[in-house]
Image (cartoon, rainbow, N blue to C red):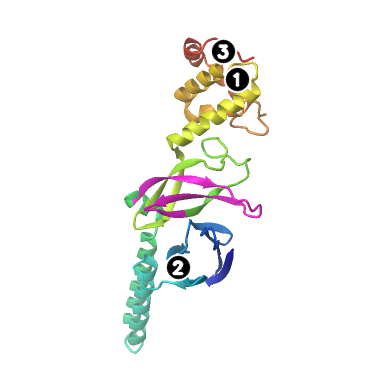
Amino acid sequence: MNQLSWTYLADNGKQHFVGLAHGAETGHLVVHCNSKVVLIDFKVFDNASYSIFIDEQLCEISIEKKGNEYYYGFEIDNQADTPRNRARKKLEKQHLLQSIAFLGTLALVVTIAIFAISRWTSYHDQKNISAKLQRAGQQVSARILLPKDESVDYASYYFVINGKSYATATTYSNKLTELLPNGMPLEEGDEFLVTYIPGNPSLNQIDYQQPTQFQINRYRDRVIDRLLQNNPKIEKAYLSCFSDHIYKEKGIEGMAHLYFQKTSSSKNSRHNRQTFERLWQDPNLTKTIEKNCGTIPFE
């Protein structure tokens, strides 16, 4: 396993620690920044290059194979057409103009300074990632990865575009006690839609409110297994029918009530034993379930 690390000093003085791990035999490649996975690729046996963003600065990681040896490089790309580089070039041009204008009038110097500030602000406004994703983003499914290293606090997700994998750290802990907005825990292999910029998939955002059909099926199996554990005397066929109608009427929120059937309200105030009981005591819902599945056997 080849491992290297670099330290990148950002314009604001903040240090970022970039690490690379590359299996010479498997070809598997992982790049992390500040202990968070930012890129994953598989079967990398030849020359390759990857682009990652650190504080909106485009950085290039290169792999060069010479014989049986691999050589790795990390460089800052100051020439690519990115908002950060455009802003930097604009600022450099403004500094030159300011130096020339130093011998001019004070009014000219003030005018140039104001213009520079306004341009700098406009570039930062354009670099709002959420706005870019909403305007020009495309969607693809992404899967959750849970780190095997217990010192890494956050999970990550990866997706594939044109045969190339991209990975990003999640905003959710890998601890099973932390729940998603839909009330369910995050587990290895869970799948949600992610929005990315086609020209730069490294700019992306996962949406935990948009599980794929694959993930909805995983939730269904997970809930039925939990119901079987909590209610061993009830047949699986009934529990499957029951959970299907709960999902049809209440969505994933309803499935979370089933999943946490035996959980106390002190441990989960949103989905627990009391919310489960209130769910199947709803007269309209009860009528639908009894019509399609039979009498509700929960005590």
As for residue 159 lying within the magenta part, the answer is yes
The residue lying toward the viewer, choosing from 291 and 280, is 291
The residue lying toward the viewer, choosing from 31 and 97, is 31
Q: Main secondary structure of the magenta part?
A: strand
Q: Residues within 10 Å of mark 2 (few under 14, many from 20)?
A: some
Which residue is tagged 2? 59
Tell me, yes or no, whether the two marked residues, 3 and 1, touch with CB atoms within 8 Å.
Answer: no
User: What amino acid is at disc 2?
Assistant: Cys
Q: Residue at x 57, y 69 (%)?
A: 5
User: What amino acid is at disc 1?
Assistant: Glu
Residue 36 shows in the view: yes
Which residue is tagged 1? 277
Image quarter hosting the N terminus: bottom right
The residue lying toward the viewer, choosing from 163 and 284, is 163
Q: Nearer the viewer's eye, disc 2 or disc 1?
A: 2
Which residue is tagged 3? 296
Tell me, yes or no, whether the two marked residues, 3 and 2, touch with CB atoms within 8 Å.
Answer: no
Ranked by sequence position, the earlier of labels 3 and 2 is: 2
Residue 257 shows in the view: no
| Bounds of the magenta segment | 137-166
> Looking at the picture, how far across and down is residue 227, in whole percent?
60, 24
Task: Please determine whether, in this image, residue 265 is positioned above or below residue 148.
Answer: above
Quadrant in the rendering for residue 210: top left
User: What amino acid is at disc 3?
Assistant: Ile
Task: Please determine whether, in this image, residue 243 is positioned above or below residue 208.
Answer: above
